[in-house]
Image: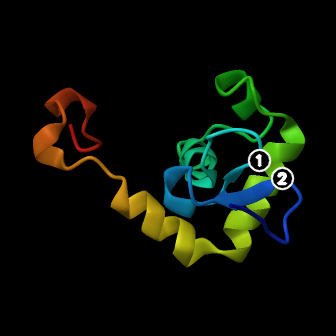
């Protein structure tokens, strides 16, 4: 079942990523947009990396994050690849 949120483009669907907030009509989680933004990609550049998204969707995802930081951070933490499973060159401290 798809559940709308107070954000126009953000929904939850129990059948997609276990109900994690996503951009409606996609499987793109809000956390993916937040992680790109945290890497220094500007909101205006994110649609170049995720061309199926509009700038309005990107800004709505960042707005959702601003309102739900602890929730999205928990999803980011839960989906982080452990250091022992990543190549040393891909680690931030490398």
Say the numbered circle drawn on residue 24. 1
Can you give x and y, in whole percent of width and height, for residue 89 in the image?
21, 28
In what element is the residue under mark 1?
loop
Residues 65 and 21: in front is 21
**Extreme residue toward the left, this view:** 84
Q: In which quarter of the image is residue 50?
A: top right
Read off the residue under disc 2. 9
Q: Nearer the viewer, residue 14 or 27?
A: 14
In this figure, which colouring scheme has been used for the structure? rainbow
In the rendered view, would you say 18 is above or below 5?
above
Q: Distance between the residues labelled 2 and 1?
A: 6 Å
Density class for disc 1 (Cα within 10 Å; few <14, some 14-19, many ≥20) is some
Q: Which residue is drawn at 84% across and 64% down?
A: 7
Tell me whether circle 2 and circle 1 mark residues in contact (CB < 8 Å): yes
Label 2 secondary element: loop
Which quadrant holds residue 63? bottom right
Depth check, front residue: 92 or 79:
79
What residue lies at 49% left-to-right and 67% top-to-bottom?
Answer: 73
| Residue at the (65%, 25%) spot, across then down | 49
Residue 72 position within the rendered picture, expressed as x and y whole percent measured from the top left: 55, 66
Q: In this view, does 57 lie above or below 8?
A: above
Question: What is the quadrant of the C terminus in the image?
Answer: top left
Q: How many C-alpha atoms fall within 10 Å of the one at disc 2: few (<14), some, or many (≥20)? A: some
């Amino acid at each position: 079942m798809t559940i709308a949120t107070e954000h126009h483009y953000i929904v939850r669907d129990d059948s997609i990523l276990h109900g994690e907030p996503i951009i409606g009509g996609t499987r793109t989680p809000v956390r993916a947009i937040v992680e790109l933004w945290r890497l220094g990609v500007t909101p205006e550049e994110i649609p170049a990396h995720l061309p199926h998204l509009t700038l309005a969707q990107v800004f709505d995802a960042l707005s959702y994050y601003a309102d739900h930081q602890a929730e999205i951070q928990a999803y980011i933490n839960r989906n982080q690849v452990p250091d022992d499973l990543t190549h040393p060159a891909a680690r931030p401290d490398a």
